[in-house]
Amino acid sequence: MVPLNMLDIPYTVRATSNIAFIKYWGRRNHDLNLPYNSSISMTLDESLSTTTSVEFSSSFKKDMLIINGKKQDLSSQQNEKASYIKKVLEQARKIAGLNAHTLVVSKNNFPSGTGLASSAAGAAALSLAIVKALNLDIDTKEISKMARQVSGSGSRSLYGGIVKWHRGTLHDGSDSFAEQLFDADYWSGLIDLVTIVTESAKRVSSSKGHTLTPRTSRLYDLRPKIAEAEVKEAETAIRNRDFNLLAEIIMRDSNNLHAVCLDSWPPIIYLNDVSRAIIYTIHELNENHGKNVAAYTFDAGANAHIITTQKHRAAVEGALSSVNGIKRILYSKQGNGPRLLSDDKSLINDEVIRHIGIYKY
């Protein structure tokens, strides 16, 4: 049971996005967010972060979720993300032996729905905040399973540095979790230049793509096999700090992902002309250096993540300056994972509670 003194106290967590070097695309189990292949990512710093406050109270009339100032109906059957969040809340309440309703207020410091993994940061922040608010005695591996159910890549944002999300094989998802492979200090010179091409939401959501591509792409059967092999190769390259090899693995995996997206029916096209110009620019830069000094990778969107090292940051930024259509570039080092914030950072206050009308005044 949750102690009564744990109620009516907001707990606030800040978590960050991650960029997958080897990506997950396609769910073998929709309800549990179980992937067809394992994946490896680098957790970013707070340049791309989500802050989430969670409060449980017997005074709340119902569960309420507010994301970036907009109310989300957790009872809606049409809102897939809300249904995942509701499921995680119900699981946590069951573990805690609690019936109180919940208020969740979440805010990103970067655009949502643009292929920058805002849902990953949000899922990690939410899951950890729930655990803190309910004083649950569970480890990070178990929290990563909670986050996975809200957003698959969210399981990876529970850790800093380089993280692996295990595909798992069990039907109940109990062996599909994330773990840290290397902390942020292991290869501290590894950085991400997040290249913003558009801040508009993508036409095809990641959630829809995860279902459509495995079902319709004639190339997809090869994708999980290739990705599993790349996970092992990437882990070795990172352990050896072999950037030349890692960069090729990263770029090939990104290309493979977008190839199966294009082969979906109807086709899913995330990249635009500026995205392609960035690809050509990075290949030309690498050719000029006689080795790979940068790697592009695109999640489900047109915005590019350029993975490079501190040593070559200036050269990469110089090359990107010649690409028309880049709106801005965010610099990110490796992050250390989510953290609990002090009470004065809470997004929940009396004004918010009264405004949304869930308190029994």
Image (tube, rainbow, N blue to C red):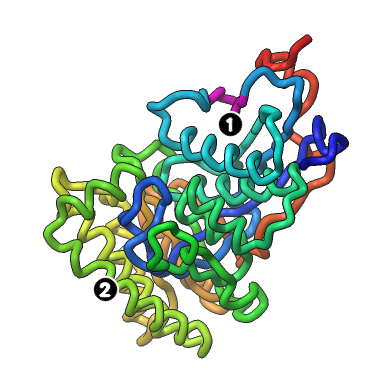
Residue 68 tag number:
1
Label 2: which residue? 225
Residues packed near mark 1 inside 10 Å, few (<14), some (14 to 19) or many (20 plus): few
Q: Main secondary structure of the magenta part?
A: strand
Going 47% across and 56% down the picture, which residue do you hit?
Answer: 153
Q: Does residue 317 appear in the picture of this structure?
A: no
* C-alpha separation, residue under disc 1 versus residue under disc 2: 38 Å
Residue at the bottom extreme, as displayed? 240
Relative side of 311 to 343, left or right: left
| Residue 36 x/y as whole percent | 32, 63
Residues packed near mark 2 inside 10 Å, few (<14), some (14 to 19) or many (20 plus): few
Asked if the magenta segment contains residue 200, the reply would be no
| Residue 28 x/y as whole percent | 31, 56
Foreground label between 1 and 2: 2
Residue segment shown in magenta: 63-72
Going 26% across and 50% down the picture, which residue do you hit?
Answer: 273
